[in-house]
Image (cartoon, helix red, strand yellow):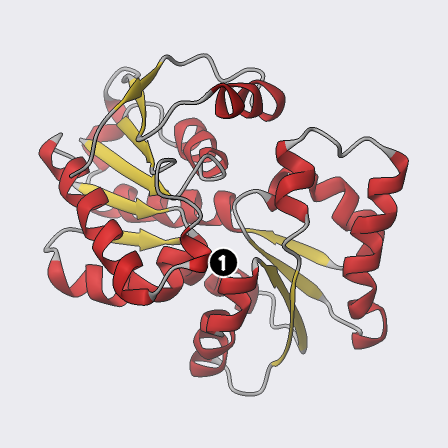
């Protein structure tokens, strides 16, 4: 069985890595739409169009299950895609929220990019499932360039991370959803800022767990098969992206293939 994952760029490779570890006997295909990022500044209509093209490409490679690793596409297009395609589709928002609510939080924090926070998708999803939970959300767009430029270990960037997260100090949050696929890469920095008592919800590992549970229930025999191959496709492959992949995924030993989505 083949699993397809798509994201607007390379942040979704955190999801790819978690799913690869959790499901070694499944073939996995990753598509990063790097030619058309960032999705966050585009309209819902455009993101819907891009998302459909991404899934059509993955289906053309015989993917039978799709994971939307992009928070923006999950925010704007998940419902449309789940209605359009008659295959299982997982998204990072649903998995992250489900995991967070299992902890029975009273005060739940959410961080993400501007578009993800502005869409209020996390707040709506949380409130729909548990209206009693107080939700505190904060956009932290600076985190992505910090990660992609490999600047996390610089002392002054720890201060920048703290300045973005001090909003939560007086909120008394008990858990925090990392609402961007880049953010797990600075989990230690985030944890030190919000305190050790705050549980961090990693959407990458949570969607991998949700997918594993589904497959154990519906396709248990697939787990008995030998390890399967992985493929990574990008719609653009510049020197910048090569350097970013090298900085944040040093052990990601896969050849990247280019694809042109019309």
Q: Is residue 178 visible?
A: yes
Q: Position of residue 106 (x, y in %)?
A: 67, 78
State whether residue 122 is above or below residue 60.
Answer: below
Q: Nearer the viewer, residue 54 or 198?
A: 54
Q: Is residue 196 visible?
A: no
Q: Position of residue 28 (x, y in %)?
A: 29, 28
Q: Position of residue 146 (x, y in %)?
A: 69, 39
Question: In the image, 101: left or right of 156?
Answer: left
Q: Position of residue 24 (x, y in %)?
A: 35, 23
State whether residue 89 is above or below residue 223.
Answer: below
Question: In the image, 112: left or right of 160?
Answer: left
Residue occupying image coordinates x 66% and y 54%: 200
Quadrant containing the C terminus in the rendered view = top left
**What residue is shown with label 1?**
96
Residue occupying image coordinates x 40% and y 46%: 69
Residue occupying image coordinates x 13% and y 39%: 59
Residue lying farthest bottom?
132
């Amino acid at each position: 069985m083949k699993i397809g994952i798509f994201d607007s760029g390379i942040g979704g490779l955190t999801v790819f890595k978690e799913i690869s570890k959790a499901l070694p006997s499944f073939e996995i295909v990753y598509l990063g739409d790097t030619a058309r990022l960032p999705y966050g500044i585009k309209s819902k209509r455009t993101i819907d169009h891009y998302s459909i093209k991404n899934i059509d490409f993955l289906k053309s490679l015989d993917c039978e299950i799709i994971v939307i690793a992009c928070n923006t596409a999950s925010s704007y297009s998940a419902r449309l895609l789940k209605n359009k395609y008659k295959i299982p589709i997982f998204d990072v928002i649903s998995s992250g929220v489900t995991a967070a609510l299992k902890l029975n939080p009273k005060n739940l924090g959410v961080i993400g990019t501007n578009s993800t926070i502005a869409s209020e998708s996390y707040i709506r999803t949380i409130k729909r499932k548990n209206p009693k939970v107080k939700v505190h959300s904060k956009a932290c767009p600076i985190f992505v360039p910090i990660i992609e430029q490999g600047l996390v270990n610089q002392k002054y960037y720890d201060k920048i991370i703290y300045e973005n997260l001090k909003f939560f100090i007086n909120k008394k949050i008990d858990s925090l959803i990392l609402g961007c696929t880049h953010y797990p890469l600075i989990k230690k920095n985030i944890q030190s800022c919000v305190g050790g008592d705050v549980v961090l919800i990693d959407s990458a590992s949570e969607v991998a767990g949700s997918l594993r549970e589904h497959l154990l229930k519906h396709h248990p025999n697939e787990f008995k098969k030998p390890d399967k191959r992985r493929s990574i496709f990008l719609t653009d492959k510049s020197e910048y992206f090569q350097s970013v992949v090298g900085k944040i995924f040093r052990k990601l030993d896969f050849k990247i293939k280019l694809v042109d989505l019309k």
